[in-house]
Image (tube, helix red, strand yellow):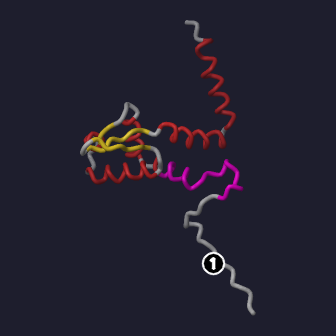
Amino acid sequence: MDSPAAPPSVPSSVPSSVPSSVPSSVPSDDEASAFRALADPTRRQILEDLRGGELAAGEIASRFSISAPSISRHLGVLKGAGLVTERRDANRILYSLAEERLALCVGRFLSSVCPEQIVLRNTKWRSAPEGDAS
């Protein structure tokens, strides 16, 4: 009998989960979705707007000159990346910034790319109040 054929290779454009044996310095597809979401200036502005607290979808849409369905798509991308959360309040959908998720994704990337800078910044932040005797 012939031996079974090897499975076809998966094109690199097809997302796959990262095996647990891959070092944590290699971003997962989940983390990559956060960076794809951050690539768009409208989505970054939405995140900045949410810094002040939760906003209804209509309130968010009113801050932009693009259509409400376009804002809805942007919110869907942000939600899919885990950067915002939503909750229903009667007939409104309220969105909030998922601060911890955003900080973890960006922080993990920065600490793997420029760990010396992270240490320097932390040192400056900690020493600033003590050194600020003015």
The residue carrying mark 1 is 8
- Asked if residue 26 is among those painted magenta in the image, a careful observer would answer yes
- Secondary structure at badge 1 equals loop
Which residue is at 39% across, 39% downward? 96
Q: Position of residue 14 (x, y in %)?
A: 55, 67
Question: As displayed, is residue 8 above or below residue 19?
Answer: below
Q: For the C terminus, which image quadrant? A: top right
Residue 110 lies in quadrant: top right
Q: Closer to the camera, 60 or 38?
A: 60
Question: As displayed, is residue 83 above or below residue 22?
Answer: above
In the picture, measured across the screen, residue 122 lies left or right of residue 30, that is: right
Q: Closer to the camera, 121 or 56?
A: 56
Which residue is at 51% across, 53% downward? 33
Furthest residue in direction bottom, as rendered: 1
**Number of residues whose C-alpha sits closer than 10 Å to that of mark 1, classed few (under 14), some (14–19) or many (20 or more):** few
Which residue is at 66% across, 43% downward? 112
Q: Position of residue 15 (x, y in %)?
A: 55, 63
Furthest residue in direction front, as rendered: 90
Residue 130 lies in quadrant: top right
Furthest residue in direction top, as rendered: 134
Which residue is at 69% across, 84% downward? 5
Question: As displayed, is residue 19 above or below residue 42?
Answer: below
- Asked if residue 48 is among those painted magenta in the image, a careful observer would answer no
Q: What segment is highlighted magenta in the picture?
A: 19-36
Q: Position of residue 122 (x, y in %)?
A: 63, 26
Q: Amino acid at mark 1?
A: Pro
Q: For the N terminus, which image quadrant? A: bottom right
Q: Position of residue 40 (x, y in %)?
A: 42, 49
